[in-house]
Amino acid sequence: MDEYEIYAIKYAGPLESSGAFVMWNREWEKTVKRNYYVWCIKGAGQTILVDAGVAPELASEKNLKGYVSPTEVLSRIHVKAEEIRHVVITHIHWDHTSGVHLFPKAAFYIQDEEYRFWLKDPVAKRAPFEHLSDETGKAYLASLEGTDRLVLLKGDQKIFPGIECLLSPGHTVALQAVAVNTAKGTAILGSDCAHLFRNYREDWPSCLIVDLVGWMKSYEKLRARASSIDLLFPGHDFLMAENFPQVAKDVTRLV
Ligand SMILES: [Zn+2]
């Protein structure tokens, strides 16, 4: 089976927020540090990106602290954004999707249910959802509908030998994690199924919940699929930038 390496590409942060943001309804008095990442999977002659990050226009609109375009950070490990052919979108929140137009040759792999919710369901236009997505990224994805650059997945699906998308709802209606075969076994990029490593260990979600029952089942599923809990990576933990070997500025090798 093909083996891959995984790199965390930090494109913004650290930001501080209330502990209760990342540990739902607990730790109101604490503050936590968060970074923003995309991930790069390399191996078997392939380069696959997980999430598109934030485009420069939106980053300045939101005044995103410590922002450097994900394409700039990727170039530090000699990955050219304009040559990337495959981008897995874990979920359609602004910090994971608004940069889709930075990858003009990529096919985007998204859960069909996630896409349909954000693009077609009137509920997604309501305030609590609308402020979590961005119009530009959604419009770009919609412009690809019906072409081979938008790949809508239904549930768990292998997209390459040794790389499988895993439906993991809870944070959004159909967030997907990415299971990757590595030299250490199966690693999972869980994106915002957990903001921090702690969420998986303490079995506790972040505050952005659409389905708490589904989320608890997703935790069980991902913990069972990863070869060890150390290979289950969260979406925003600053430790991904600190506890792993640095290969370039803002780039660490997770496995
Ligand atoms: Zn996020």
Image: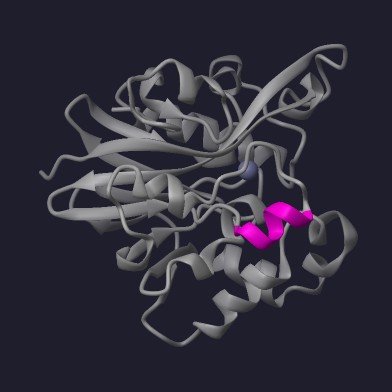
Is 153 or 40 nearer to us in this picture? 40
On the rendered image, what quadrant is the N terminus found in? Answer: top left
Is 163 or 216 nearer to us in this picture? 163
Q: Residue 142: which quarter of the image? A: bottom right
| Magenta span dominant secondary structure | helix
Q: Residue 188: which quarter of the image? A: top left
What percent of the width, then of the height, locates residue 235?
Answer: 55, 36
Residue 174 sits above or below residue 213 on the image: below
Taking the magenta stretch, the answer to whether it contains residue 56 is yes
Residue 25 sits above or below residue 66 on the image: above
On the rendered image, what quadrant is the C terminus found in? Answer: top left
What percent of the width, then of the height, locates residue 172?
Answer: 66, 50
Image-based side of 224 in relation to 15, left or right = left
Residue in the picture at 52% in, 31% down: 234
Residue 170 sits above or below residue 197 on the image: below
Residue in the picture at 70% in, 77% down: 120
Question: Which quarter of the rendered image does ligand 1 occupy?
Answer: top right
Residue 227 sits above or below residue 71 on the image: above
Image-based side of 185 in relation to 208, left or right = left
Residue in the picture at 73% in, 54% down: 60
Taking the magenta stretch, the answer to whether it contains residue 70 is no
State which region is magenta: 55-61
Is 25 or 108 nearer to us in this picture? 108
What percent of the width, then of the height, locates residue 93?
Answer: 66, 54
Say how the picture is coloured.
one colour
Q: How many marks?
A: 0
